[in-house]
Amino acid sequence: MEMPTDDDIRAMLSDRASRLPTAAARAETILAAARAHAFLEPRSSRRRLAGGRWAPRVAGGVASLAAVALTLVVLAVPLIGRPSASVEPSAHPSASAAANQASATPAASPEAEIGAITAEELQALFDARGTELVGLTVAVDGDLVSHPSCSGKAACVDAIVGGTTITVLPVGDIGPGPWDGSGPISGTFALRLVAMRGVPQGVVAQYLGDIRPGPNGLAWSLADIIAGESRQETGFVVARGWLVRSPLHSCPTSLGPSGRLSFGCPSDDYLSIERFQPMLADGSSISPPATDALYLPSGTYDEWAPDPAPVGVGVEPREGTFLLAWTGISPCGPLADCAFRPNDFRWTIRGRLDPTHR
Amino acid sequence: MTDRWEGRLDPALIRRAQDGDVDAFTALVAGRIDPMTRTAMAILGHEADARDAVADALASIWRELPRLRDAMAFEAWSTRIVVHACRRALRRRGRERVREVAIDDQTGTAGLSTPGPADAVSGRIALERAFERLDADARSILVLHHLDGRPLDEIASVLDVPLGTAKSRLHAARRSLERALEREER
């Protein structure tokens, strides 16, 4: 066995580092998350050692932190531009017509119209479009089977989509799915397509996790999700709806520990069956959705809405098909090691199913 | 090598940010987010974790900036905060379920052509799997050296350790990677 050279290590790390969506989507998402953190934890008043002056507490607390949020977001847009075509209003192919019309249709598309693609369809996409697919997340019905390169090895978790030549890599080192090494597994999988040098078509699939289909197709209705019908500890459920965000609220200067997702501060974010505008006539408040809506962490709209509208008093709802996970939200922040309590579990969006048609 | 800030730091901008000027803080970090994310992504290999780590780091930078004594140390200091955020993310991940498995079954692959240059693909995948066996410190120093292209003295500054310690840690990380690769290919 040959030891890796510096170039081998550099190429591997470069590939890992490049498996991200467009810089625009990335920076906006992170700035939004940082904004939420800034609201949670105001800068404390500490003695500034350089120059011997005292660092002033952020004047006005809430007002100044709100200014941080607005400035970060507003500045990010001209710096990094808008998302590329790969994050245009999107949906699964079978629901593409509805998804690509950001119309004033009052309700989301029926769940029955959303379906997974087959392994053969995925192979055809790879063959036809190669690296054009990078950044897409797809739902695939099929099998995951051992990668041919694993032959004879005791420990090998690399796989391909059964019946194809498409390499599937676990994400990170925690392989979220049911792959137990006993043989191929069948099901519906969320795969994200990422670039990798030296493989056919220059694209591999990252295994994000299993999808638990709904009672009438791939997607669940939001009503069933809210009722708890779809709840599970691992993997994803799929739902289609309108992502909406309220105007930014003034927030308390200290709400809780760093690292905990914030709900309602600085914005209320919903995945709603209804295309509603969360701005009242006075432009300062939110009217809760009239129909079924899932309450999501603040910042969700910025992170996952297709072509998110810039920050403002009222942002345009965006329709999409999303991967939802039932997730424990640490009650103690990133530095503490404490158990989740029942109320620390919430729904969060972990991905968006993108159109696979041109 | 990632884009870095040497020669472009404006001490006055940093001082304004230290004093709570949000415009200055925004200007300070806006161009830094992509390289931060790239570093975090290489260490963590997971997009959501990398985004969270950088968001954590930005919040910490905002909060702790008044403590920074030497404005010219901002680049190394902020990178250290990103590395610490990645370490916390890996620690959190370590508490989650880890599944390491053996796969011997080849069912379903009969008749398939091996994808591309099989050895190259296999080696490339094995190297990444081996990297994921490493702890946070080893991952971080390999990323700082091989991806960011930082010299050892700069790595020592980022990690806040003596030069000799940085050198020995880099050597140890490289050896750990080789041993992990041996196990991966066994």
Image (spheres, coloured by chain):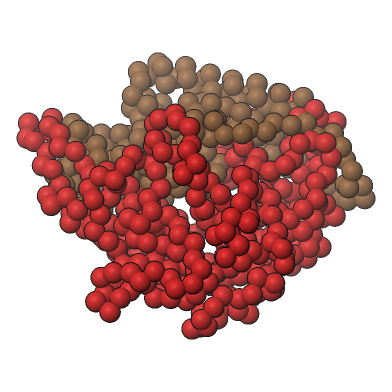
Chain colours: A red, B brown
Q: In which quarter of the image is the N terminus of chain A?
A: top right
Q: Quadrant of the C terminus of chain A?
A: bottom right
Q: Is residue B182 above or below residue A22?
A: above
Q: Which residue is drawn at 64% across and 75% down?
A: A110
How many numbered marks have been drawn onto this rendered protein structure?
A: 0
B10 or A110, which lies in front?
A110
Q: Please provide percent x and percent y for residue A4.
A: 64, 30
Q: Where is residue B180 in the image (x, y as percent from the top left)?
A: 65, 24
Q: Which of A212 and A181 is in front in this view?
A: A212
Residue B6: quadrant of the picture: top left
Give coordinates of residue A207: x percent, y percent. Answer: 67, 48
Residue found farthest to the right: B111
Q: Position of residue B175 (x, y in %)?
A: 59, 20
The residue at the point 41 percent across, 48 percent down is A261
Residue positioned 44% across, 29% down in the render: A337
The part of the image, by quadrant, that contains residue B4 is: top left
Residue appearing at x 33%, y 69% in the figure: A286
Q: In this view, does A331 lie to the left or right of A228?
A: left
Query: Is residue A302 in view?
Result: no
Q: Is residue A138 visible?
A: yes
Q: What is the residue that sits farthest to the front in this orientation?
A: A227
